[in-house]
Structure formats: structure tokens, C-alpha cells
Amino acid sequence: MNLKNLLDLSDDIFKTLTEQSTLGISVSDLKGNYLFANNALSIMTGYTKPELLSMNNSNLLETELIQVEHEVINQCTNDTGKQKNAQFLIRRNDNSLFTALIISKTINLGGASCILATIQDISEEVIKNNETKKKEHFNNIIREVSNDGIWDWNLTESIIDFDERYYTMAGYQRGDLSNRISEWYKKIHRNDVANVISQFKAYMAGEIKNYDVEFRFKCKNNNYIWIRQRGKIIEVDENNKPLRFVGTHSDINMQKEYENEIILQAHFDSLTFLPNRFLSLDRLTVACEDAKRKKTLVALLFLDLDDFKKINDTLGHEAGDTVLIEASERLRSAVRSIDTVGRLGGDEFIVILGGLKTVNEIHPIIENLLKKFRAKFSIRSRELKLTTSIGVAFYPNDAEDTSTLLRHADSAMYDAKAKGRNTFSFYTDEMNTIAQRRLCIEEQLHDALTRNEFFVVYQPKIDFSTLNIMGAEALLRWSNPTLGQVSPDEFIPIAEQTGFIVKLGEFVLKEALKQAKIWQETSKNFQIAVNLSPRQFRDPKLFSLIKNTIDHCKIPPHLVELEITEGVLLKGQDYIKDILTYITDLNIKLVMDDFGTGYSSLNYLRTYSFDVVKIDKSFINEINDSAKDKALIHAMLSMSHALGIKVVAEGIETKEQWESLKQLGCDYGQGYLFSKPIDVKAMTTLLKSKKNICPD
Ligand code: C2E
Ligand code: MG
Ligand code: MG
């Protein structure tokens, strides 16, 4: 009996089963010719049953998979009765493809071998499977790339599961850590755990949208690393109660280190490691807020090292830095640990003393601060005495806001300086007036030149050997309608700071040289001395200004003296040395003003070719009262003369002073004893009269 007949003869049960099945069912001979196909296969493939029965399974299978199909058939042939599962791409009647799982088995039907197969369309499953695989692959890549640890928290049982990376991040191995959440909390730094718990609670209660916390986590080696934990609820019960919480652990240790570095740089002074201006003022605000609540006082101490600039200028920046570090240590050691010592910049420091009940409480602290500076500073095998001036202002007594408080403490500091340094001053309203005046001077200075408010006065200089006026020093005067007469001691430092001195200096030089030229017509060798300030040397046009003015006035250069202080010689910068060399090469005289008040006067005399030194009036004041000062003047004179340098004594006020100076062999003198600085008219008259201005 042939096979087809045999299948036709099959009973109703077989037919019913095969026709109702959603699986495709086929019977084919060993060559693949279909002998039977059910409805489902017909629907699946789009071929009618008669069409299928005239087809071979090779017509249905996509070419690419034929290899597999052959294998199956071959295997079936050789291995009869064994079930084979395989996936095929099947081409439908409409030429489209679908993936099918075909389970085939060789059976014996009426003595003949044939293949019974079930065909299942698994296209959708395959697509889903592929998507899942892709997702998993993607997740693995992300995990590898992000280097994050993954955790899965069962909220009902308070158990947390971690992946491998989570363990390795902190040096653990799986099994080292308990899965109990209570144990996990124990690994978090005690200063961070409260925040982690509160963030967790807030997120669970829906008070915050994202769970994102940072904390220090204890590693196996007992060190802590910074972790950023982010999580999301992924399962809730019917009452919306969270059941499962998953998320990541990221190692942010490096980032934290950078952050700390940045915070350190942004808040602390890199030289002294004291809080910088920004942090100091922030601490001041906090201290004031605290005082407001507790009804206490805050004392703000503004400190400025006395004559620090001189150290910097004469010994160099490195020495200056060493002094600042040492000074900051002394300040720190003088106050309580709860107090803030901060560096505002340069040689300015503040000390914040909070929680005070009375103003008097700060006296011992100030005493202590000043005492700390009594010990000498040892810099480059030199012993230097360095003092500090302290200004004090109180919150809320003197100011109710921090910036005013700071300004007031600053004014008080200026007052301490004016009182002779190495002391302190409490802020008073009067100081505010002084500070306001400073501001006003700055404002008024701006246009004062164009308003012709400046004029030059001249102080005669006496030659002790002839008692004649041998020249004069040009001194600037300012008369302003708002401020009245302003002393150069007041406006010159401000003009220095603002840079306005450059224009002022130009004005004085031109005025003085022009005037001197006129006086030289009658007083032949009349010398004119002009002061130059340090800031002017930073002006690249300074030398050409000097040269052009001399050329323009046709004044002999050897009758021009330029007075500079040690401040000009700064750090021995090359360009300053160059200008000074050009100046002396032109035959202009170089004068060292205020000699003896700096640190390296002697060294400068060796390095630069000074023609004249002017002994500072502070020495002259004391010449007859202090044997030490007299001895110093004597030494200055001997040394200068040995170097071929002439000496002027400035600020001679009494006959006794003059006598002593003459005895010591001083060359020239200047001072109220002979004449105060006088205007052009008075000077002209004086020169014309040839009057002897020396007392008998
Ligand atoms: P300085 O260059 O040392 O000038 C000497 C100062 O001593 C002058 O003060 C002068 O009036 C004063 N003086 C002279 N003899 C006596 C005296 O016998 N007793 C007393 N107590 N003082 C005396 P002045 O004019 O007030 O100038 C002060 C400082 O201002 C000057 O000190 C100088 O550093 C600066 N200055 C003045 N004019 C100029 C200028 O045109 N350019 C620059 N850069 N600085 C100037
Ligand atoms: Mg001078
Ligand atoms: Mg002087």
C-alpha cells in the first residue's frame, strides 16, 4: 500500500487532532515530498493543502538554512526514530519569511519510513529573545564601562544583594559582607550615615524625586572610599508600598579628592594654609549670626605687619614668604582653637573672636598677640624684629553687617599704625571719618591735575662748608576746594596705590626742572632734587621722560638730583638697575632718601652708584638725645665718605642738631632751622637777596 493511501485511511481522531492543532503538522517521505499537511501549516505558509502536497520541503525552506535541513534529513535517515529539533527560516507563499521550530521524527508508516514533523511559528519569540539578549549585552557593556556596582534591595525582608563589582570596589570578596541592610549601614562612615538614612526615608515617602547620596564606605582594609549611591523603586504593592529598590554604587573617590583639592584651593591660602579672604569672611558672617542668636559679641581684629613691605622689597619675596608663614603660626598660637585666624592677602590677617560677653575680654588676647611678635624672626640667618598693628571692631556695637565691620576694623588698624605701630586701636566713629577722607582723597585726586590743584614748593639745601643755598628739594603740594590742603604724606601713598603718581611725578619733574633752569640764570650751580616714587619705576616711559625733560629744559644733568627710597630698589629687578645705570650714565645725581630706615641700605650703596645719601630725619631728631643715634649718624657719615658719597641731613630743626652734624662732618643740610619748603615766589626772592638763612 502506498503511503498516501495509508494516510487517507487514517481514522477520524487523527484528522480531528491534526486539523484543530495550531501547530503545523506534516508528513513527508524521506526525500522531503509532502504526503500530508494540516490546516495550520497551510495558514502558516499561505499555500493551500493541495499545493503543499505537490511540494517538497526544500521549496519552503530558505536557502540559507538548507545546510541545516540536509543535516537533519541525513541524520534522520541514518538515525531513524530519533527526534530532531531545529530552527528554520520558512518562506511563505507571499515570499515573506518566518522562523519556525521544527520537531521531526522518522516514523514507520505501513512499513515505509517517513518523517513526521510539527512546525511552530516562533518569529515573535525569536524577536523577543533577541531583544532581551541585546539588552543584556548592552547592560553588561554599560556596567563594565561605568564601573559601577549594582545592588538590589528587598525592602520587605531588609536584605540587599550586590553584584561582583560592588564587592571589588571596596576590596571585598563575595561572602565578606552580610546581606542584612543593618550590617550594610555599619559600613557607612558615622558622619554620613544619618544623611543616607534621611535621604532614604525621604525618597521612600515620596518627599524627594531622586535618591542620590554620597557617603564614605568602609573598605576591607578599614580605609574609607567615597561612594555615590543612586537608586529607584522598581516594585510596589497594591497600596503603593515600595517592595524593591535597585540602584548603583559608584566609586567617586577620585572625584572627591579633586573636589577637596579645589575646595582647599578656593578656601585656604596656599602659602600659610590659613582660611583665605573668602572663607574668613564667611566665618565672620557665621560668627555674627551666632552672636545675634546668643546675644553675645564678636571681636574682629584686623592685623597688618609693620614694615613688611620693606622685608619683601629688601630681602626678596622668598624671605617675605617665610616671614608670613612664621607670622601666621604665631597668630594661630596666640588665640583659642575655636577662633579663626585668616589671611586676607599680602601681610593682612584677621582674627575672629566669637562668643564674647564684654569688650574687655579681648585684652588678654591682644596682649598675647602683640607678645608673640616680640621674639625676633630669624630669616636667612638674620634676626629681624617684626611687629604688628591691630585694629579692633565689635559686632554688633560698631557695625551690624560684616563688610562695615571689616572696614571699621581696617580703619582702627590704620589708627594703630598712626599711633606708632606695634599697638592696637579700637574702632571709633572718628576713624570712620578718616576712612571716608581716604576715599574722598582718592576720588578728588582723579581730576586734580586737570583742575590745576597741584603746585611745587622748594626747600633750600645748605652747603655746610659755605653756608650758601646750594639747591633745593622740590616738594609737591595739593590744595583742593573740598579737602583743603592735603599733605603729601597723605596723598602720595594713595596716588602710589592707584598709579596716579605716574602723572603726578611727570608734573613735578617738568615743573621743578623748568623752574631750576630759571634760577640757574642767577644762581649758577643751583641743584634741583626731585623725588621719584617706586611706582614710577614700573612706568616704561620713565627714563625717556627724564631724558626728554632735561633736554627740553636745557638743564645740565649734573645739577639734577633724583631722590629714591629703598622701596624703589625692590627685589633688585634688572630693569630697575638698568634705569638707574642710564640715569647715572647721563650724569644725573642719584640720591638715597630716608637713609637708615630700611634693611639693606648698606648693600644698596655697594650695588648702585649713589652720589648722595640723605640721613632720615628720625635720626636727626634724636641726635642729641640718643647716643646710639649719634653713633649711627657717625657711622653713616664715615661709611658714605669712604665710598665717595656726599651726605645730606634732612629735618634739621635746632641749632644743636646742626652743630652736632657739623662736628660729625656732615656735608649738607635741609630743615626748618634754615627754611620750610617755600613757593616759587619766596624762593626767587630768597635767591635774589642772597640772604644767609643759617642762624648765627
Ligand atoms: P621726603 O622726600 O623725605 O621729604 C622731606 C620731608 O620732610 C618733606 O615733607 C619736608 O617738608 C619735611 N621736612 C623738611 N624739613 C623738615 C623739618 O625740619 N622738620 C620736619 N618735621 N619736617 C621737615 P613733605 O613735603 O610733607 O613730604 C613728605 C614726603 O612726601 C616726602 O618725604 C616724599 O617722600 C613725599 N613727596 C613729597 N613730594 C613728592 C613728590 O613730588 N614726589 C614723590 N614721589 N614724593 C613726594
Ligand atoms: Mg626727598
Ligand atoms: Mg626724606
Image (cartoon, rainbow, N blue to C red):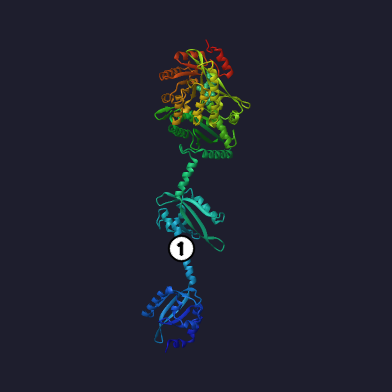
Q: Is residue 334 above or below residue 205?
A: above
The kind of residue tagged 1 is: Glu
How far from the left and from the top, in percent, is residue 306? 49, 28
Residue appearing at x 56%, y 56% in the figure: 206
How far from the left and from the top, in percent, is residue 512? 54, 22
User: As drawn, which residue projects farthest toward the right?
Assistant: 481
Q: Is the CB atom of the residue marked by disc 1 within 8 angstroms of ligand 1's nearest atom?
A: no
Residue appearing at x 48%, y 40% in the figure: 268
Q: Is residue 432 left or right of residue 144?
A: right
Q: Is residue 117 above or below residue 241?
A: below
Question: What residue would you read off at disc 1?
Answer: 136
How far from the left and from the top, in percent, is residue 533? 51, 27
User: Mark 1 falls on what kind of element?
Assistant: helix
The quadrant of the picture occupied by the N terminus is bottom left
User: In this view of the protein, which residue sits in the foreground, 475 or 202?
Assistant: 475
Q: Is residue 100 left or right of residue 431?
A: left
